């Protein structure tokens, strides 16, 4: 019962649009499902860690977070600046680079035919699992992080958190991460199936669309950062 409740709440949280789903879909379209699957496992690891803290040591984790922010006032602006540069840089990368799925899509066989190949993670400069962990962990700089953290604790409390032992708390955290993982993987598999049916020209257009989306997101984050620092 606790596991299923965690899965449902994780699914509901996953429905909130954000950079995680955008990065996952872009990985699927440009490099294939293997890369995006590894990415979702990195996200899953951070999700269950955050959820475990929310239901086991929410007060201590929140206090530690606030003390770190107040002790190092430049920490959050620095992380946000890095995120802005990464989003803009990745957007330019997608706009200028030929999709990896397009480069690997066809291989000439001995008989002169062609076979389709899935994207590989071997040539990735940053392993997608590491990317998933890093991107999800970076959400701590979001203004809504503490609110979401407190809301998850409150939801668990409404389900009987006070009477749970540590095994039940960890089971809930695992279910929360699993719910998000199921949603992400479902979206990535659908995107992978659609990508296989795209023509070469459409695949290029889709990648450029993702590149433009990341650029816009980076510019929006930049304006929010400047507004926070200057006003």
Image (cartoon, rainbow, N blue to C red):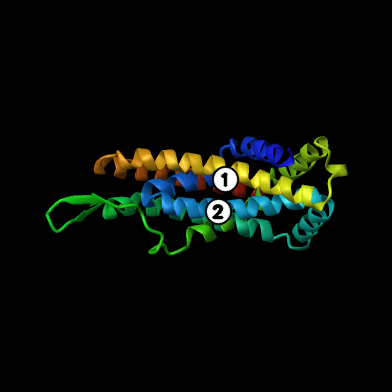
Which disc number belongs to residue 85? none
Measured as percent of width and height from the top left, residue 1 is found at 73, 37
Hey, which quadrant is residue 123 in on the image?
Answer: bottom left
Measured as percent of width and height from the top left, residue 25 is found at 45, 44
Task: Residue at 48%, 58% (x, y): give it.
Answer: 128
In space, the residues marked 2 and 1 are separated at their CA atoms by 7 Å
Which disc number belongs to residue 181? 1
Q: Is residue 231 visible?
A: no
Q: Contact, CB < 8 Å: mark 2 with mark 1? A: yes
Observer-nearest residue: 211 or 32?
A: 32
Outermost left residue: 111
Pointer 2: what residue?
Answer: 41
Observer-nearest residue: 110 or 217?
A: 110
Task: Residue at 51%, 53% (x, y): give it.
Answer: 39
Task: Residue at 39%, 64% (x, y): give it.
Answer: 122
Task: Residue at 78%, 62% (x, y): give it.
Answer: 71
Which is more N-terminal, label 1 or label 2? 2
> Is residue 66 left or right of 219 when viewed as pictured?
right
Report crowding for label 2: few under 14, some 14 to 19, many 20 or more residues within 10 A (C-alpha).
Answer: many
The local secondary structure at tag 2 comes to: helix
Observer-nearest residue: 64 or 102?
A: 102
The local secondary structure at tag 1 comes to: helix
Measured as percent of width and height from the top left, residue 7 is found at 65, 40
């Amino acid at each position: 019962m606790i596991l299923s409740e965690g899965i449902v709440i994780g699914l509901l949280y996953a429905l909130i649009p954000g950079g995680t789903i955008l990065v996952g879909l872009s990985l699927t379209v440009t490099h294939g499902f293997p890369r995006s699957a590894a990415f979702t496992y990195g996200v899953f690891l951070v999700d269950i860690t955050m959820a475990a803290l929310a239901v086991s040591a929410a007060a201590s984790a929140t206090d530690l977070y606030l003390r770190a922010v107040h002790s190092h006032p430049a920490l959050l602006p620095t992380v946000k600046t890095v995120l802005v540069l990464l989003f803009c840089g990745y957007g330019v990368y997608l706009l200028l680079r030929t999709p990896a799925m397009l480069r690997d899509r066809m291989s000439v066989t001995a008989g002169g035919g062609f076979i389709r190949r899935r994207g590989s993670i071997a040539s990735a400069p940053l392993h997608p699992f590491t990317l998933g962990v890093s991107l999800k962990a970076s959400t701590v700089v979001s203004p809504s992080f503490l609110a979401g953290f407190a809301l998850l604790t409150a939801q668990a409390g409404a389900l009987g958190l006070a009477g749970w032992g540590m095994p039940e708390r960890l089971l809930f955290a695992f279910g929360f991460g699993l719910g998000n993982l199921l949603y992400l993987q479902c979206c990535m598999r659908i995107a992978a199936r659609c990508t296989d049916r795209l023509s070469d020209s459409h695949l290029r257009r889709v990648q450029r669309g993702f590149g433009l989306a990341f650029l816009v997101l980076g510019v929006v984050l930049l304006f929010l950062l400047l507004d926070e620092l200057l006003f």
